Image: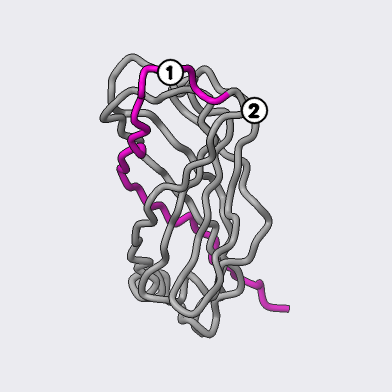
């Protein structure tokens, strides 16, 4: 019986994004907080490069799922994300619906969120030239002005090799 070979790779994407500005009118922040969507951004999937580099093809792709998703505050330095208590990451692609890819619920007093990936199949999204990523955060206080985060997305890709 021949050994079955399966290709398992994590495909990584990194993107910096500004935190939406919430003007501070000098009054207390709403006690219930505010959920604010970030503008979505495009990620080139590089799926054709993945297939070429790993001696496989789109028809041999078996699964693509969120693996690790992290959000790190990069600006201003030496501060944290204590003004956010929930983060969600959504993925969409042309002709495909937006799906929740990862989330983190609960106040975080650190400068980074390690989100919990959802068990969602993203194979059809990975096969597109581009995917779109949109963040949504629940703010419990005003963010520092001109704050910037780095979003790291890792997808677990599984495929069979060409014969």
Image coords of residue 129 (percent x, y): 36, 75
**Looking at the image, which is closer to me, 63 or 110?**
110
Q: Is residue 24 part of the magenta span, yes or no?
A: yes
Is residue 106 shown above or below 79? below
**In which quadrant will I find the N terminus?**
bottom right
Q: Which quadrant of the view contains residue 99?
A: bottom right
Is residue 130 shown above or below 1? above
The residues tagged by marks 1 and 2 sit, at their Cα atoms, a distance apart of 24 Å
Q: Which residues are magenta?
A: 1-30
Image coords of residue 16 (percent x, y): 30, 43
Please give the residue where the numbered disc 2 appears in the rendered image: 106
Is there a contact, CB below 8 Å, between mark 1 and mark 2?
A: no
Q: How is the image coloured?
A: one colour
Image coords of residue 69 (percent x, y): 51, 44
Please give the residue where the numbered disc 1 appears in the rendered image: 27
Neighbours of disc 2 within 10 Å: few (<14), some (14-19), many (20+)? few
Which residue is at a point 42% across and 70% down the rendered structure image? Answer: 54
Earlier residue among tags 1 and 2: 1
């Amino acid at each position: 019986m021949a050994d079955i070979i399966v290709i398992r790779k994590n495909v990584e994407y990194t993107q910096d994004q500004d935190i939406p500005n919430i003007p501070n009118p000098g009054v207390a922040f709403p006690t219930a907080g505010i959920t604010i969507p970030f503008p979505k951004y495009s990620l080139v999937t590089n799926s054709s490069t993945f297939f070429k580099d790993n001696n496989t093809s789109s028809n041999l792709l078996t699964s693509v799922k969120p693996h690790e998703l992290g959000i790190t505050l990069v600006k201003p330095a030496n501060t944290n994300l204590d003004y956010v208590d929930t983060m969600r990451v959504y993925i969409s692609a042309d002709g495909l619906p937006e799906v929740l890819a990862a989330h983190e619920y609960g106040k975080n007093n650190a400068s980074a969120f390690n989100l919990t990936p959802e068990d969602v199949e993203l194979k059809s999204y990975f096969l597109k030239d581009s995917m779109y990523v949109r963040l949504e955060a629940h703010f419990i206080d005003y963010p520092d002005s001109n704050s910037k985060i780095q979003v790291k997305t890792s997808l677990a890709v599984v495929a069979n090799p060409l014969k």
